[in-house]
Image: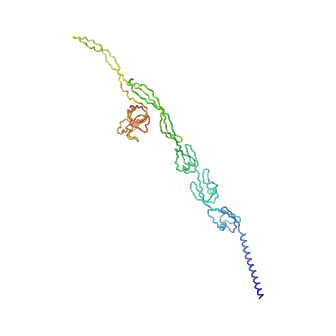
C-alpha cells in the first residue's frame, strides 16, 4: 500500500514538471515573439496639423500608417508623401487638414480650400499678386483661418478734371460717389459731378467735377440825360438855343454772375442803384414866323375939278411907295417833348409767344394798321404818344419781358416789315 502511494506521488511529480516545462516554453515563446514584434517596428514621426507624434509601426506604406492611426485624409488636405509611398524608419509624415475661406476679387466671391498658414501664402498659392494701389481687407501677415473672408480690390486708373485741373488717379471704387469719398473730394452746394454720383466707374473713365460759384459784380454806368425841347415864340422858327446843359447821371448795376471752373456762364441783373440822377438838357425851339406884306405904289396925278358948291373932300392917300412892315405870326414848331435815343426791335401779332393782345388790352390782329410800340413803363408811361424816327407817331400800348430801359419794340402787321426794320437805334420824342 505504501509503495503504491509513493509511486503515485512520483508519477504526479513527474507530470507536474512536464506541465511547467511546457508552460515555460509557451511563455518564453510569447515573450520572444513580443520582443521580436516590438523590435521589428519602424519608428516614424507623424505631424498632425502642426503637432508631432512619434509612431512605431509595422505599416509598409503611408496609407497603412494613416489607417492604423484612424486618419482619413481628404482630397484638399496637405500630405507630405503619397499614400502609396513606402515607409522607412525616421520618415516624417506631415498632414494638414484643409479648411474653407472666402476669396472675393473685385466683388466676385468664391469658396476656396486651403492649408496655408498665412494670407500671404494663400494669395501666392492662388497666383494672386497685389500691386501698389490694390486694396485688401486683411493684412498679408495675418493668420489664415477657417471661414475667413479675404477681399481684394484691384486698382485701375481714371481721368479726373477737378475745377479745370486734370489728373490721372488710381482707384478701386466702382461708383462715382465711392470714388469721391475715397479721394476725399468734397462738393460744394452748387458744385456738380459728371457722370452722376450713382453712375459706375471703370478703367479709363473720365470724371468731371464742375466747381460752380455765384458772385456779385457791381458795374458803374452813366445815365444818359434826356433832351427836352420847348417851344419859344420869341425866337424865329428854325432856330434853337440851349437853355440848360444836360448832366449825365451815375448808376450801379448789381449782377449775379454764375462761374463754372472760373469761367462766366451767365449773369443776371438783380438791382440798380442810382448814385446820381441825370439832369435834362433844355433846348428852346423857335416858333416865330416872319411874314412880309407887299404894297403897290403909283405916281401922283392931279386932276382939276369944278365945284359948284363948296364941299370938303377927303384927301386920297398918296400914291407914293408904302414901306413893307413886318408882321409876326406864331405857329407850332412840330414835335416838342422829351427826346431819347433808344434801341429798337420789331414784332408782329403772330410772333412766338404773342397773343395779339397788348398788355393794355389793345387787339393788334383786329387793327393791323395801328402804330403801337412796346415800352418799359418806367421810362415811357403806357398810353403816351411817341414820335419814332422812321416809323411815325405811335401809342405806347404794350410791354415785353425783354423791353427794359431805353429800348422799344415796334409793331408791324407783317413779318417782312418786321424783318426789314431789324435792330437799330433811333431817336424818339415823347409827345405827351
Regarding residue 5, the answer to whether it shows in the image is yes
Residue 340 percent coordinates (x, y): 43, 31
Q: Which quadrant, please, contains the N terminus?
A: bottom right
| Viewer-closest of 158 and 405 | 405
Q: Which quadrant, please, contains the C terminus?
A: top left
Q: Is residue 217 left or right of residue 116?
A: left
Residue 316 percent coordinates (x, y): 28, 14
Identify the coloring: rainbow
Q: Is residue 302 left or right of residue 71?
A: left
Q: Is residue 322 left or right of residue 267?
A: left
Determine whether 112 is above or below 204 in the image.
below
| Viewer-closest of 370 and 3 | 3
Q: Is residue 151 left or right of residue 289?
A: right
Q: Quadrant of residue 105?
A: bottom right
How many numbered marks does the figure carry?
Answer: 0
Regarding residue 269, the answer to whether it shows in the image is no
Residue 178 percent coordinates (x, y): 55, 50
Determine whether 33 is above or below 9 in the image.
above
Residue pictured at 76% horizontal, 86% vertical: 5
Q: Quadrant of residue 90?
A: bottom right
Q: Quadrant of residue 234?
A: top left
| Viewer-closest of 352 and 267 | 267
Outermost residue on the left side: it is 308
Determine whether 314 is above or below 184 in the image.
above
Residue 83 percent coordinates (x, y): 65, 65
Amino acid at each position: 500500500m505504501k509503495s503504491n502511494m509513493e509511486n503515485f506521488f512520483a508519477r504526479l511529480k513527474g507530470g507536474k514538471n512536464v506541465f511547467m516545462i511546457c508552460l515555460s516554453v509557451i511563455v518564453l515563446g510569447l515573450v520572444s515573439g513580443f520582443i521580436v514584434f516590438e523590435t521589428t517596428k519602424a519608428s516614424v514621426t507623424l505631424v498632425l496639423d502642426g503637432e508631432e507624434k512619434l509612431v512605431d509601426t509595422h505599416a509598409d506604406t503611408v496609407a497603412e500608417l494613416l489607417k492604423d492611426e484612424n486618419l482619413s485624409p481628404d482630397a484638399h488636405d496637405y500630405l507630405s508623401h503619397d499614400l502609396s509611398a513606402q515607409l522607412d524608419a525616421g520618415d516624417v509624415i506631415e498632414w494638414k487638414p484643409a479648411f474653407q475661406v472666402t476669396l472675393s476679387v473685385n466683388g466676385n466671391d468664391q469658396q476656396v480650400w486651403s492649408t496655408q498658414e498665412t494670407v500671404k501664402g494663400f494669395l501666392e498659392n492662388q497666383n494672386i499678386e497685389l500691386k501698389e494701389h490694390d486694396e485688401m481687407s486683411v493684412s498679408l501677415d495675418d493668420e489664415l483661418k477657417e471661414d475667413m473672408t479675404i477681399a481684394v480690390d484691384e486698382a485701375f486708373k481714371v481721368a479726373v478734371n477737378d475745377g479745370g485741373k486734370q489728373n490721372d488717379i488710381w482707384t478701386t471704387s466702382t461708383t462715382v460717389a465711392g470714388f469721391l469719398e475715397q479721394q476725399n473730394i468734397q462738393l460744394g452746394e452748387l458744385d456738380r459731378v459728371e457722370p452722376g454720383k450713382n453712375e459706375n466707374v471703370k478703367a479709363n473713365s473720365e470724371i468731371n467735377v464742375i466747381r460752380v460759384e455765384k458772385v456779385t459784380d457791381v458795374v458803374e454806368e452813366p445815365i444818359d440825360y434826356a433832351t427836352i425841347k420847348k417851344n419859344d415864340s420869341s425866337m424865329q422858327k428854325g432856330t434853337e438855343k440851349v437853355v440848360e446843359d444836360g448832366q449825365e447821371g451815375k448808376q450801379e448795376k448789381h449782377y449775379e454772375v454764375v462761374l463754372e471752373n472760373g469761367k462766366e456762364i451767365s449773369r443776371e441783373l438783380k438791382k440798380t442803384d442810382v448814385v446820381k440822377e441825370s439832369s435834362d438838357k433844355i433846348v428852346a425851339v423857335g416858333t416865330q414866323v416872319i411874314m412880309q406884306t407887299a404894297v403897290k405904289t403909283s405916281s401922283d396925278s392931279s386932276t382939276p375939278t369944278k365945284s359948284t358948291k363948296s364941299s370938303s373932300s377927303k384927301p386920297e392917300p398918296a400914291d407914293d411907295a408904302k414901306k413893307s412892315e413886318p408882321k409876326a405870326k406864331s405857329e407850332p414848331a412840330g414835335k416838342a417833348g422829351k427826346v431819347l435815343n433808344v434801341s429798337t426791335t420789331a414784332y408782329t401779332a403772330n410772333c412766338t409767344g404773342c397773343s395779339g393782345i397788348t398788355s393794355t388790352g389793345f387787339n393788334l390782329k383786329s387793327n393791323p394798321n395801328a402804330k403801337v410800340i412796346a415800352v418799359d413803363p418806367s421810362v415811357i408811361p403806357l398810353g403816351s404818344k411817341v414820335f419814332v424816327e422812321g416809323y411815325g407817331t405811335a401809342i405806347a400800348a404794350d410791354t415785353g419781358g425783354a423791353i427794359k430801359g431805353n429800348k422799344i419794340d415796334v409793331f408791324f402787321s407783317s413779318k417782312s416789315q418786321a424783318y426789314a426794320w431789324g435792330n437799330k437805334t433811333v431817336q424818339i420824342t415823347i409827345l405827351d
